[in-house]
Image: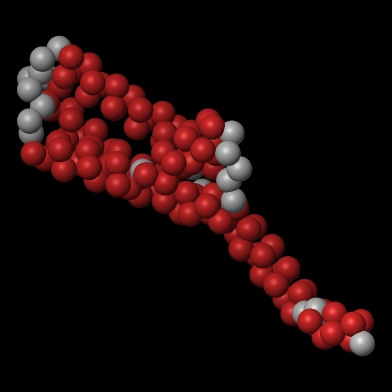
Amino acid sequence: MSKIKTFAMMPSRPLVATLLALFIVITATGCATLPPAAQQYASFSDYAEAVFRHQNQLISQIMMLEAQGSPLDDEDLKDAEHAMFDACHLLNEYAEREADGDSISWLFKRRVQNSIAACDDSIREFEAVLAPLQHN
């Protein structure tokens, strides 16, 4: 009797095959293409690392300007900085988890991957707002 219950609770072979095929398609399509801004990079991970480094470079510039006593009370700059942090929060969380040696699920990696282009765009917008303030 227990064999019958165990067998009845198992998913059918077509269902298992369909779920496996769906998983492969979702995973493969996520890794296949780079956003237009990333075409200069060999892989998506290279692009993500470059975006992360670009963001850190701008944050370092802000910190240096503040240390030099430069007034950075510009409202547009603050708005652009907040937008950048909002758009890049998944990338930053990913980097923190990786640095801590935490395991990272493929679902979270996919969310990060889907957010990189918006993060990159917001970094460029922040940089454009910051540029004129650096020369004052």
- Residue 124 in the image: x percent, y percent? 28, 38
Relative to 86, residue 107 above or below: below
Q: Quadrant of the N terminus?
A: bottom right
Q: Quadrant of the C terminus?
A: top left
Which of the two residues, 9 or 52, is positioned nearer the viewer here?
9
Q: Mark yes or no: residue 35 visible.
A: no
Q: In terms of image quadrants, where is residue 102?
A: top right
Relative to 58, residue 17 above or below: below
Which of the two residues, 15 or 8, is positioned nearer the viewer here?
8
Relative to 77, residue 65 above or below: above
Q: Residue at x 33, y 47 (%)?
A: 87
- Residue 44 in the image: x percent, y percent? 54, 42
- Residue 24 in the image: x percent, y percent? 69, 62
Q: Residue at x 42, y 46 (%)?
A: 90
- Furthest residue in direction top, as rendered: 68
Q: How is the image coloured?
A: secondary structure
Judge left or right: residue 58 versus residue 93: left
- Residue 57 in the image: x percent, y percent? 33, 24
- Furthest residue in direction front, as rendered: 1
Which of the two residues, 80 or 29, is positioned nearer the viewer here?
80
Q: Mark yes or no: residue 67 visible.
A: yes
Q: Residue at x 7, y 30 (%)?
A: 73
Q: Residue at x 60, y 52 (%)?
A: 106
| Image label count | 0
